[in-house]
Image (spheres, rainbow, N blue to C red):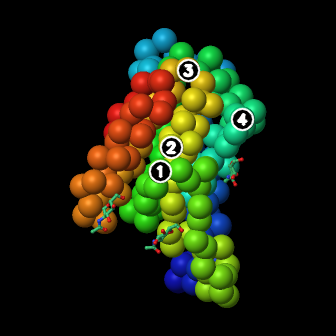
Amino acid sequence: MVKITFFTPQLLFICVVVTLSSAVTVEIPVTAPSAAPKVPGSLFSLSIEHERWLDWAGNTSRNEFFFNVLDNLISITDEGPQIRIGADSEDRTTYQQGIEGVQLDIPGPSSDVPYPEASNVTVGDGFYEAARFLPPGTHVIWGVNLKADNITQAVLVIFSSYFRQSMSHKT
Ligand SMILES: *[C@@H]1O[C@H](CO)[C@@H](O)[C@H](O)[C@H]1NC(C)=O
Ligand SMILES: *[C@@H]1O[C@H](CO)[C@@H](O)[C@H](O)[C@H]1NC(C)=O
Ligand SMILES: *[C@@H]1O[C@H](CO)[C@@H](O)[C@H](O)[C@H]1NC(C)=O
């Protein structure tokens, strides 16, 4: 007698699932156990593209929504998050004195890329000054375009990002 012929693959699968789900019990406590390790307060941090930085931070006045999100986070974690501003668009960014805000060259959308990234991001001092719209204690890391291989550009960006904001940062 061959009993196993009763078990089609589907039946076998159902049996396995039932066995597993009845064997595993996961309890999630409402408060963290006293022995639980603490994660760093800045575990939640952000990386923002240069081309959208002013949308997040605010251009001429602070973005209240973004400010409140970060401020609430700081009061929960007791630590300012790390905000990295650059990502891959930093290597398409050129600094030009006198530019207000940011100027973007955005290629036309296609069916493959309906929301294209800017091919060219031109920024002035106000771009870096917008870091003042972040809550105090936020750590800012600015991206510098090293792909352009232009040391004058890199130094100008470092000076602008350093002198145009008053909070702690790394460049
Ligand atoms: C930022 O503000 C300047 C000055 O009002 C304006 O020329 C520019 O278009 C604004 N840029 C953005 C991204 O809102
Ligand atoms: C980027 O835009 C700026 C300002 O419009 C322009 O001077 C510069 O030539 C552009 N760079 C490239 C690589 O297109
Ligand atoms: C490097 O950057 C400086 C400052 O923006 C600019 O004047 C110069 O033309 C650039 N050099 C090259 C080779 O593009």
Could you say which quadrant of the image residue 26 lies in? Answer: top right
Q: Residue at x 51, y 72 (%)?
A: 119
Image x and y of residue 55, in percent: 67, 49
Q: Which residue is mark 2?
A: 125
Q: Is residue 120 above or below residue 29?
A: below
Q: Is residue 58 above or below residue 32?
A: below
Q: Is residue 24 above or below residue 51?
A: above
Q: Which mark is residue 61?
A: 4
**Dot 3 and dot 4 residues touching (CB under 8 Å):** no
Q: Amino acid at mark 3?
A: Pro
Image x and y of residue 98, in percent: 53, 50
- Tag 1's secondary structure? loop
Q: Nearer the viewer, mark 1 or mark 4?
A: 1
Q: Which residue is mark 3?
A: 136
In the foreground, 127 or 108: 127
Image x and y of residue 163, in percent: 42, 31
In the foreground, 136 or 157: 157
Mark 1, Cα crowd under 10 Å, few <14 / some 14-19 / many 20+, is: few
Reading the chain from its start, which is encountered first: label 4 or label 2? 4
**Dot 4 and dot 2 residues touching (CB under 8 Å):** no
Direction right: furthest residue: 64
Q: Separation of disc 2 and disc 3 at Cα?
A: 20 Å
- Tag 3's secondary structure? loop
Pointer 1 residue Cβ closer than 8 Å to ligand 3: no
Q: Amino acid at mark 2?
A: Asp
Mark 2, Cα crowd under 10 Å, few <14 / some 14-19 / many 20+, is: many
Mark 3, Cα crowd under 10 Å, few <14 / some 14-19 / many 20+, is: some
Instruction: Tell whether 126 sits left or right of 170.
Output: right
**Dot 1 and dot 2 residues touching (CB under 8 Å):** yes
In the foreground, 111 or 24: 111
Reading the chain from its start, which is encountered first: label 1 or label 3? 1
